[in-house]
Image (cartoon, rainbow, N blue to C red):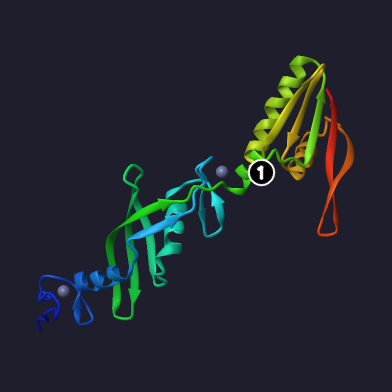
Amino acid sequence: MIKYCPTCNRSSEEARFIGEFCEFCVADKIKATLPKVVKVRRCRVCGSIRDSKGFTQYTDEAMADAIAQQMHAPNCKIKLKEFDEMRRIALLRIECELNEGTVRFNYEVDVRFTKEMCPSCYRKSAGYYEAIVQVRGSEHKVAGFLDSFSRFLEKGNAFVSKTAEMGNGIDMYVSDKKLVTGYFMLHKTIKPKVSYKLYGVKKGKKLYRHIYSVSL
Ligand SMILES: [Zn+2]
Ligand SMILES: [Zn+2]
């Protein structure tokens, strides 16, 4: 038996039906409940965006996740088809599971970005560091060390907030002391001397900076 949609009068020969209504009208009803504008938190320095897990490098998946947080559509899966950075419009593919069936549709939403800094950029800008690595040796050896060490830090999402050239080497102020320890565990031929310097107390816990003296 042919059904007719009570809203638009399309017949079941023209459109797929979900319950009493055609899929277009079902999609329209859902669209009417979705926001036209979403706010996405983005770091103004490095461009990372905040998805449900935290600040992360921009990917289509992270962007879709960040947008989904604002859509308040718990039965719907949201994918990013396209993001127009100039016009700040995201084209989404939305798939919603309803009792009567699944409905899929495209949806455009305006994206507003916040102008904040992610925690990592914030610490960097504040000159944050947990460890000082003092490297001494010939120019050639120091350069080789810096190259390998910097790449290791970058992979671990840490950074050097300050460097100071010394007569026979360089001092590096590094954001993450665990990563520095990790580096020396991997490169066992380098045996740094380690000392600790108290620099503060947080919630009753003494905070130490690690100082690594490396002779190459
Ligand atoms: Zn209809
Ligand atoms: Zn950042």
Q: Position of residue 64 (x, y in %)?
A: 42, 56
State left or right for residue 196 relative to residue 8: right
Residue 93, image quadrant? bottom left
Residue 40, image quadrant? bottom left
Circle 1 Cα neighbour tier, 10 Å, few/some/many (<14 / 14–19 / ≥20)? some
Extreme residue toward the bottom, this view = 1
Report ligand 2 position as a quadrant: top right
| Circle 1: residue type | Arg
Q: Residue at x 40, y 52 (%)?
A: 112
| 129 in relation to 106, above or below | above
Q: Secondary structure at mark 1?
A: helix
Number of numbered markers: 1
Quadrant where the image shows the N terminus: bottom left
Q: What residue is disc 1 on? A: 123
Is residue 103 something that shows in the picture?
Answer: no
| 6 in relation to 158, above or below | below
Quadrant where the image shows the C terminus: top right
State left or right for residue 23 relative to residue 205: left
| 64 in relation to 58, above or below | below
Is residue 74 something that shows in the picture?
Answer: yes
127 or 190: which is nearer to us?
127
State left or right for residue 51 relative to residue 91: right
Q: Position of residue 88 (x, y in %)?
A: 35, 48
The CB of the residue at mark 1 lies under 8 Å from ligand 2: no
Q: Position of residue 25 (x, y in %)?
A: 20, 72
Residue 210, image quadrant? top right
Q: Position of residue 16 (x, y in %)?
A: 18, 72
